[in-house]
Amino acid sequence: MPRTIFGDEHELYRTTVRQFLQSEVAPHYPGWEKQGHPGREFWRAAGEAGLLCPTVPEAYGGPDADLRYSAILIEEMGRAGYSIGGVSVHSDIAVPYLVRLGTEDQKRRWLPGCVSGETITAIAMTEPGAGSDLQGIRTFARREGEGYVISGQKTFITNGWLADLVIVVARTDPTAGARGISLLLVEAERAGYRRGRLLEKLGQKAQDTAELFFDDVRVPSTNLLGHEGAGFGYLMQELAQERLVIALGAIAAAEGALEWTLRYAKEREAFGRKVIDFQHSGFALADVATEITIGRVFADHCLGEYLAGQFDATTAAMAKLWLTELQDRVVDACVQLHGGYGYMWEYPIARAYADSRAQRIYGGSSEIMREIIARRLRET
C-alpha cells in the first residue's frame, strides 16, 4: 500500500539508515547481546551519520527536522530485528525535554553532545515500588543552599549503564502530591551517583537497561529542568510522543516478522510441499498481513496527526495498546509457522518473540492504556 507521509528526501535518508545498520550494527549485534549494550563507538558512529536527535534545532548542532526522520530509523531497526530502543529514548524521549524545557545555558551545554553521540541521555522514572503510578515515586530531592540533594533508587532505566546525563524524576515536596514532582538533570560524574546492575532481561538483550542509585547526589539549582513542582505535568505532556514512538516500533517489528516468515515459508518444505502452500499456513499469513496493513495505516495516520499538532493522549494510548498487542499476536503466529526453528535464537523470529513482550509493559502497560481510553469514553 502506498505511503504518502514520506517524501523523496525521507527515502534518501532511509537509504542512509539501511547502509548504517548493515555496516555499523549487523556485524556487532550478537556481541552487544552478550555484553548487554552497544558500545560508545556505536553512539558516536550514529551521531556522525546524522541519525541522532533529528528535532534538535540547528543552533545547538541538530538538523532541525521532524519526527519522520526518527520514524524511519525506528522502522528500519524494527524490520531488521534490532532492539536498540535506547536510540529512541535518547533522541525522541529524553532530549526533547531539554529542547522544550531547557534554559539557553542548558541547551548549549548539552545538546551538541547529544546530537554527536558524545553525550548519552536517559530518563529515570521507574522505581522498585513505582512503575505506571508516577505519583508513587519516593526518590526525593531536598533544597539545600543553592541546589538540591537527591536520594533514591531507580530501576529498568534504558541507557542507564552508559548514560552521561540523566533526567531524574524526583519529589521536591512530599506533601504536594503530583505538584511536588520535579525534573532534575544529573551528570554521571556527580559524587553519590552510581550504577547498579546491568539488568539481565528476557529479551532486548542488546539494550542497555540498568539500576541507578542516588546517594545524596548534589546538583546546583541550574540543573532544574523547567519549574519546580511542574514535573508531573511535563511528563504527562511528553508521554503521548513516547507512546507513539513505541507504537511505531511495534508495527515495524511486526512487518519484519512477516517478511522473515514469508521467506521461510516459501523455502521450507514439509510432506513434499512448501510450507506456504498448506491452506492453514496461507490463511494464517493472510490474517497476519491484513492486520499489519490495518496497523500500518493507523500508525501513519497517528504520525500525521502528531506532525499536524493534533495528536492527543487518548489516541496515543490507542496506538500503543493496539499496535503493541498486534506485534505480540503477529510474532506469536510467525513463531508457530517456523515450527521448531522459531524457538532457536539464531533465527530472528526467536529474538523478536522475546523482544516483543516488554512492549506491552513499558511506556504505560496495556491495562493503563485501556484505563486512559475508558476514562475518555466516560467523559463523552
Image: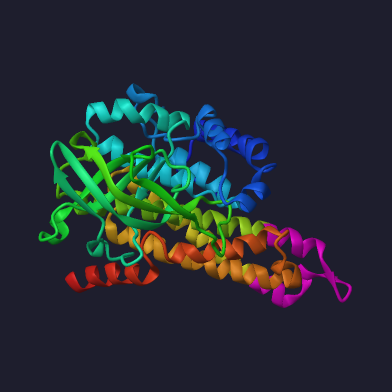
Q: Is residue 95 visible?
A: yes
Q: Position of residue 3 (x, y in %)?
A: 51, 46
In the image, residue 209 above or below residue 53: below
What's drawn in magenta, residue-wise? Answer: 260-284
Magenta stretch: residue 278 in it? yes
When asked about the image quadrant of residue 186, the answer is top left
Residue 13 relative to residue 210: left or right: right
Residue 173 relative to residue 279: left or right: left
Residue 295 relative to residue 320: left or right: right
In the image, residue 313 above or below residue 37: below
When asked about the image quadrant of residue 134, the answer is bottom left
Who is closer to the viewer here, 274 or 175?
A: 175
**Name of the residue lying farthest toward the left:** 175
Residue at x 57%, y 40% (from the top left corner):
39
Q: Position of residue 245 (x, y in %)?
A: 42, 51
Who is closer to the viewer here, 121 or 153?
A: 153
Q: Position of residue 341 (x, y in %)?
A: 75, 67
Image quarter of the C terminus: bottom left
**Name of the residue lying farthest toward the top:** 59
In the image, residue 331 above or below residue 299: below
Q: Position of residue 274 (x, y in %)?
A: 82, 68
Residue at x 49%, y 53% (from the top left corner):
249
Magenta stretch: residue 279 in it? yes
Residue at x 71%, y 73% (from the top left corner):
281
Q: Is residue 299 visible?
A: no
